[in-house]
Amino acid sequence: MALDGEMLLWGGVTQPAEFPDSRNLERSNKPALPAPSARAGCTQVGMIPGAVAAVAAGWSAARSPKRPRRRHFRNRRQVFRAALAAEDVAKLGQEQEVLQGQLASLEEQLGLEEPKLRKAEAFGLPDREQLQLEVNRLQGLVDECRAKLQALESSLPAPGPESLLQKPPAGCLPPLPSTEAAERQDILKRVDALLLQLVSSEIEGASRKESEEAELKTLELLTSEARPLLRAFGTSERQLPKKTYTLQQLQENGVEASCLLSPKNGTLDIVRNILLAVVALGGAAVIIATKMNTTAFLVLGIGGLTAAFVDQVANRGFLQLLVLDSIGRLISEDYRKRVAQHEAGHFLVAYLLGILPKAYTLSAVDALSKYKSVNVQAGTVFCDSSFQREVQAGKLSGKSLDMFLCTALGGVAAEYLVFGQAEGGQSDIQQLEELFQSLRFDQQQTDLQLRWAVLNTVGLLRRHAATHQILAEAMARGACVGECIAEVEKSLEASSS
């Protein structure tokens, strides 16, 4: 018997040695035939005549070389089909981008015409019928474009588990030379000075026009002189394709929507319940000790309820939140970490999407001391005057909507990734609901936008988990906005080196 890799001469044709097929041996009890010799007419094949052995050897010699060739062509066909499938998907992706551009343009035109129609209807202008026809035409084109886009997105292949949120390859941000790093520090100090001046002017009651001019001046510095040095600002190196994602796809990518979009404020609820119990027991003890009559007790109770009601109406519950937040930070280290992780999520997602954070506070006490007002809650505020102008004009672009959704979800997404359940962020979710209602989105449009934003935001934070942690630590120790930006830039450079 020839060893593996030796060559035998069957019927005068050289070919690789093959071992008997085990499946044939199982089907027959006959012993395997020995390999024929070099001469086709030799009768060493047992009872088979030499001519039959020669024919069998020649048939085997003619058949055996074709086997790998058939496998080769089969592999080539598979590769060719895969290439065609990839080309088809690429074409569909290009068509999707074209349709998305057309839809954004049509929505922008519709947003310009609808305020004109409302004004014409309010004042009874003669051109209202013509404006109504134009709005109806644009609305029909928008609906048609959305239907085409939805049909195209349904034909795209569904992503597999974890395929949407995989980490990109490192190396996108090489470290800056020492001279440019020092220059970046100087520019960030200038940015800090401009932001402090902006916040101070807003506290002192500056007009909206003055605030917008100050924001524009700061953004011009970032987009011109500082742009080569702040390389992570506005990159958001990858965005998910805009399509309808199901809850199953969110789960396949490790996202439980209920844990992210339904925050449970466990720490503050516990503090509130403890305070209510202490007040009830203390009030009962005072009543027993002082032998307070029923009238005084009712007056005291009504006075407390009135104060709580006035706080809710006038201050949106700030005084109650001030007490609860202060006690929560005092007794729970986990609560302090959650707040820092939450605000760092807002900060990082906004910065990567190209929205400049203006200032941040991590507690109600810090917010009161910084803004000198009970109507401003703790959190992160941004230079978003352009977004506010679009909302007020009623012509919000698709890009602005996407950036707002991802920034608003950055806090709850960060809590979910770190702790498995979001506790803060009820006000963020409420803002999203109010925005969708003002845009008159139906449930299907809301699901399309919200699920995409959840996956995209979670993907950003997963890819920059180390940067998010460093940023949260910097914010917890009270670093200014410029220092936080420097930490983000340096962390991304270190992770890609």
Image: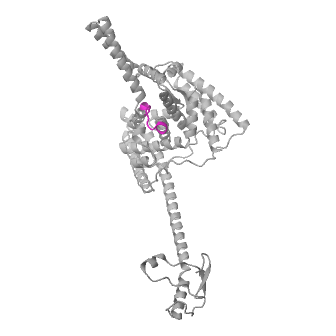
Q: Tell me if residue 294 comes above or below residue 258 in the rendering.
A: above
Hey, which residue is sitting farthest right in the picture?
179
Using the rendered image of the protein, determine whether residue 303 is visible from the camera's viewpoint.
Answer: no
Using the rendered image of the protein, determine whether residue 94 is visible from the camera's viewpoint.
Answer: yes
Viewer-proximal residue, 64 or 441?
Answer: 64
Hey, which residue is sitting farthest top in the picture?
290
Q: Position of residue 361 (x, y in %)?
A: 52, 25
Instruction: Give the magenta part as a residue range.
Output: 416-428
Q: Position of residue 387 (x, y in %)?
A: 50, 34
Dividing the picture into quadrants, the one containing residue 125 is top left
Q: Tell me if residue 240 comes above or below residue 428 in the rendering.
A: below
Q: For the N terminus, which image quadrant?
A: bottom right
Q: Is residue 269 left or right of residue 466?
A: left
Dividing the picture into quadrants, the one containing residue 4 is bottom right
Viewer-proximal residue, 144 or 491?
Answer: 491
* 419 in the magenta segment: yes
Viewer-proximal residue, 147 or 69?
Answer: 69
Q: Tell me if residue 363 comes above or below residue 455 in the rendering.
A: above
* 275 in the magenta segment: no
